[in-house]
Amino acid sequence: MIYLDHHATTPVDARVLEAMLPFFTEKFGNASSRTHRFGWEANEAVERARKQVASLMGASAREVVFTSGATEATHLAIAGGTAVAPAGRRHIVTVATEHKAVLDPCRQLAASGWTVTELPVAPTGLVDVDAVARAITPGTALVSVMLANNEIGVLQPVADIARLAHAQGALMHTDAVQALGKVAVDVATLGVDLASFSAHKLYGPKGVGALYVKRGVEKQLGAPVRGGGQERGLRGGTLNVPGIVGFGAACEVAGHEMQVEAHRVSALRDRLWQLLQERVGGVTMNGAESPRLPGNLNVGFAGVEGESLLVGLTDVAASSGAACTSAEPSHVLVALGLDKTGALASLRLGLGRWTTAEEIDRAAAHLADVVAHLRRSAPATRLAAAGASR
Amino acid sequence: MYSAAVLERVRNPRRVGEFPEGREDVGTGQSGTLDEGTTARIQVRAEAGRIVEARFKVFGCSAAIAAAGLVAEWLEGATVEEGRRLTPERVVAALTLPAERAHVARVAVDAAHRALDDVTEKAGRRP
């Protein structure tokens, strides 16, 4: 089975695992224990990891708040960033293609009286900066726009949007989960106040993430998870020391290897796209070709039904908007303007650190077989309606 | 998750294809719409009241592909009357289809019944 679902999760790098292991056993201390060496050792490891994570995103260590993952980090940004907003600011601006980790808390706020603007995107997947400028008002408390989309990989103009948010006195948050370790992320250049990250998207462990909180912005954040006062009072709870150590190690590795890896992975992605065009035909790339994450390809296959495409794929692990039980199309692809059938007949192919050229060739051949086979089974009217070339 | 019976029919479908519609010994039945997400077309070739060959084309989920394939498989060798006794419930049971996919069995069976009606009508017209 060829794993092409690296946006969902990545395997833990052996170097990361090695760094983590002692913190499950002999170095098991609670990082908050101040009275003995077990605690000191755990605390030192956490602080070392905090520096490693901060370094990859261009932050200082004290600006990193560890959480249980990116969903919690995003919750801290949105629920926390709105909890203590001034009375006159009850408005959030976000984008229709955001991850549910952003959209759901925003909708929850909408249900309690907040106004939420979900901006549309162009067929490229990019939000119109002028539309963002028109949407942000002096009543806006928070703007949340993701850096790299988790389905179509396109990179939003976050730095431009952050300037617009700040001009109106709003906080700027970005979900940078898919970007960290794949493309250069520098929170200062982006100009954001808050940014969410997750370890398991960059070959670290699951169950650990972080929120970047720009120095001074912590005064504008409420803390949804209280108790224990950890993370400067912003996130209570015993720290996941092995996970945090793994996150740090993953960032360290990514910092050294990202540039070379991005070049290699994007070349493989381009090869896959080329092969799919040649061997499958009737394919469209969903979202802009550039700027896009190096390992991302989101492809629509004309003339096939999405769920049967996924079931037919026996040798490639990929994902699509098609959930086998609900058959609800991806909200991201629908936002690009795809109809339900087109959105369901799309695959997200995510390449990663250990994807090889040989795997790409085999994946393309397998996809060509499965699609040809489904198209042969389909009535001619369906193929004509979809405009399939083969 | 689908049963092995569904997965096998999706990954190795048999009897996919079509006969020329104009032939007097061929009946064609179509059911479902693209808007609903499933459309099936079943064709049967009959000789003296018995179906000697069946073919299908389908656009839909895995369950729909498997249901159309199973119906075509059952039709081959059956008499037209036996074919008419086919029910969606039998297809659902044979493929262990999840409840939310049961409607695709009806689409496949409706297409089969229409194909049988068509071939019967053509036979009636023959001198």
Image (tube, rainbow, N blue to C red):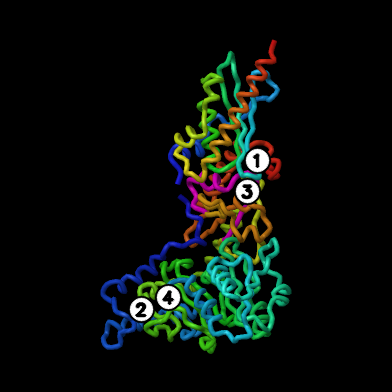
Q: Are marks 4 and 1 in contact (CB under 8 Å)?
A: no
Percent position (x, y) of residue B73? 51, 27
Question: Mark 4 Cα within 10 Å, few/some/many (few <14, many 20+)?
Answer: many
- The span from disc 4 to disc 1 (Cα, nearest Å) is 53 Å
Percent across and percent down for residue A303 are 64, 44
Is B90 included in the stretch rendered in magenta? Answer: no
* Amino acid type, callout 1: Thr
Question: Which numbered circle lies on residue A301?
Answer: 3
The residue under the point 48% across, 47% down is: A315
Indicate the position of residue B100 as horizontal and vertical percent values. 51, 46
Q: Amino acid at mark 4?
A: Gly
Q: Are marks 1 and 2 on the same chain?
A: no
Over which residues does the magenta segment extend?
A296-318
> Can you tell which quarter of the image residue A293 is in?
bottom right
Q: Are marks 4 and 3 on the same chain?
A: yes
Residues under labels 1 and 3: Cα distance?
A: 20 Å
Say left or right for A62 vs A348.
left
Q: Which labelled disc corresponds to residue A238? A: 2
Report the mark closest to the observer, 2 or 3: 2
Q: Which residue is mark 4?
A: A248
Task: Indicate the quadrant containing the C terminus of chain A: top left, top right, bottom left or bottom right.
Answer: top right
